[in-house]
Every structure is written in structure tokens, then in C-alpha cells.
Amino acid sequence: MKKNLALTTLILASTATAAIAGPIEEQIRFRQSAYSFAAWNLGKIKNQVVDHPETFNKDSVAAAANAIAAVANSGLGSLYGEGTDQGVGWKQSRLKPEFFQKKEEVTVAANTFNLAANDLAKVAATGDVAAIKVQFGKVGESCKGCHDLIRIKE
Amino acid sequence: MKKNLALTTLILASTATAAIAGPIEEQIRFRQSAYSFAAWNLGKIKNQVVDHPETFNKDSVAAAANAIAAVANSGLGSLYGEGTDQGVGWKQSRLKPEFFQKKEEVTVAANTFNLAANDLAKVAATGDVAAIKVQFGKVGESCKGCHDLIRIKE
């Protein structure tokens, strides 16, 4: 609990001081890449833990969980500069313009994802399939938390 | 050395048995995402270690190095299925058709990247800027090794 609090404080601090990275189109492209990379790894875990548990491979799932945690820890906040609700990265940005008025809610949602993803990496390292499944569900919920808040539905 | 050898064996094994992930367009899109995510993180390290060392932040560089290692450890081999030298992910694939005749050379190049990236994560955790710079150079060389071998020049 104490550790989580320290981590949250760290994230809040890094969100507040994050330097914005590069031109608008580049920020959008990098964040689309980061989330797609996370999605691929989430898919691998879903496949091995939920859909086809007979294919479960501890090392593969642990590597996928580490990848998701690395995305969560990579300072994505620096890719949400002003104007990045408009513009094309790999494709048109789906960021809602309200993002910029909802910074506090976004920080809470982002921290929830960060903590859930780091916990998934820890749980995945144990190889306990049932526990991984539970924590994977929490990561999924935390993804949805942000999507509902700031992503335009397709 | 022994550890590196064991890791190499592991990678060789996982390359050989990696199940191919999804349709051609999806494989290309995921690998373009993975490398773009790595490129963003390589850029952060270059910025803080080579170009503007006065901005060096240990936590930021360590997180970026972990992200690059997570990409290297994510089983990218499963995104190089037959036919993925042709097709569009986020954009047209730049994979040379020779890839499929150069599997052994590719494995060596991929392992070089994998080891260099994992070593960078270890060195970054120490916060030793000079050592990070040296290891960052080695990762860059390992990227180039693969690019020269199997990526079409733009």
C-alpha cells in the first residue's frame, strides 16, 4: 500500500513535469504505436489465459506482461500535448477534446492503469494462471476507464 | 557469458517455435508499432545521454531502456510470417523478400539486439551516464545490423 502510494506520487510528479515530445503528428503516432504494442501483448495474455489456457506458457505471458508494464511506465503523458486531439499519426487521433479539461480524472485513470499493469507483471512472474486471469481483468477495466473518459468511439 | 549463452539458446528456441500471430496486415501493423515504440524510447535516451546530458533523468532513462528491452523480449519473430514482406500495416511493409532466405543471419542479428537491449536495461538501472552511452551505442549498432540485412531503405 505504502509502495503504491509512493508510485502514485511518482507518476503524478512525472505527469506534471513531463516535457512534451515532438510535433503533434509524431506524438499521436508514438502513442498509437505504444497502445498497439500493448494491445498485441494483451492479446497474447488473453489467448493463453482466457481463451486457450491449454497453450499457457509462463515465459511468454511474463514477457507480455512486462511489455504492458513498460508501456504504462514509459511516460505516455508527454505524448498528449496541446492540439493532439486533432491530427493524424498512423491514423486520425481519437482523443476527445474534453481531455484537456479533464486532466485530474485522466491522471486518476492513468494511475489506475499504471498500478494494474505493474501488478500484472508481478503476478505473471509467478506463473499462477488463476491469479493472472484476475489481474488481467483489472488491467482490462483500467484500459476501459481511460477509453470511456477520453477516447472517441469507433 | 554462461547466462548470455543460455539466453541465446532460449531465444533460438522461441524463434523456432513461435506461433505466427494473426493476419498479414496485423502482423505488419504490430511490428511497426513495436519498433516505433522502441524508436520513441531510443530517442528519449539519445536526448538525455548524447544530445542534452544536462537533462539526464535516471528514472526516465531506466524506464525507456526497460521499454526497449520489453520490445526485444516480446517475441517479435511471431510477427514475421510468410507473406509479410508484402502488405500494408500502418504503412507498406519494408521487409526485404530475402528475409525468408536469411533466417540464420536474422536470428544472429535478432539475438544481438536482444542481448544489447537487455544489457542496456541493466546498465540504465545503475544511472552511470558514460556506461549507458556506450551500451546505447551498441544497441544502435544492433538495430542497424538488422536494418542493413532485411529492411528496404527509404
Image: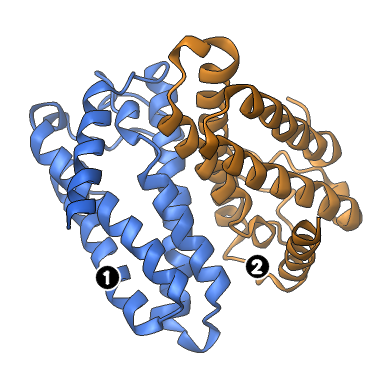
Chain colours: A blue, B orange
**Which chain letter matches label 2?**
B
Q: Which residue: 77% across, 31% down? A: B141
Which residue was labeled with disc 2? B20
Find residue A116 and report its horizontal and vertical position in percent: 27, 59
Q: Nearer the viewer, residue B10 or B154?
A: B10
Position above or below: B48 against B100: above
Amino acid bearing label 2: Ile
Amino acid bearing label 1: Gly
Q: Quadrant of residue B78?
A: bottom right
Find residue B85 and report its horizontal and vertical position in percent: 74, 49
**Circle 2 SS class:** loop
Q: Nearer the viewer, residue B34 or A113?
A: A113
Q: Residues within 10 Å of mark 2 (few under 14, many from 20)?
A: some
Left or right relative to A106: residue A127: right
**Which chain letter matches label 1?**
A
Can residue B144 be seen from the camera position used here?
A: yes
Find residue B21 and report its horizontal and vertical position in percent: 59, 65
Please give the label number shown on residue A8.
none
Q: Which residue: 71% across, 61% down? A: B81
Q: Which residue: 63% across, 60% down? A: B75
Q: CA distance from mark 2 to mark 1?
A: 25 Å
**Circle 1 SS class:** helix
Q: Nearer the viewer, residue A130 or A96?
A: A130
Can residue B86 be seen from the camera position used here?
A: no
Which residue was labeled with disc 1? A137
Q: Residues within 10 Å of mark 1 (few under 14, many from 20)?
A: some
Position above or below: B103 against A74: below
Q: Quadrant of residue A14?
A: top left
Left or right relative to B29: residue B107: right
Left or right relative to B81: residue B105: right
Q: Which residue: 58% across, 23% down? A: B129
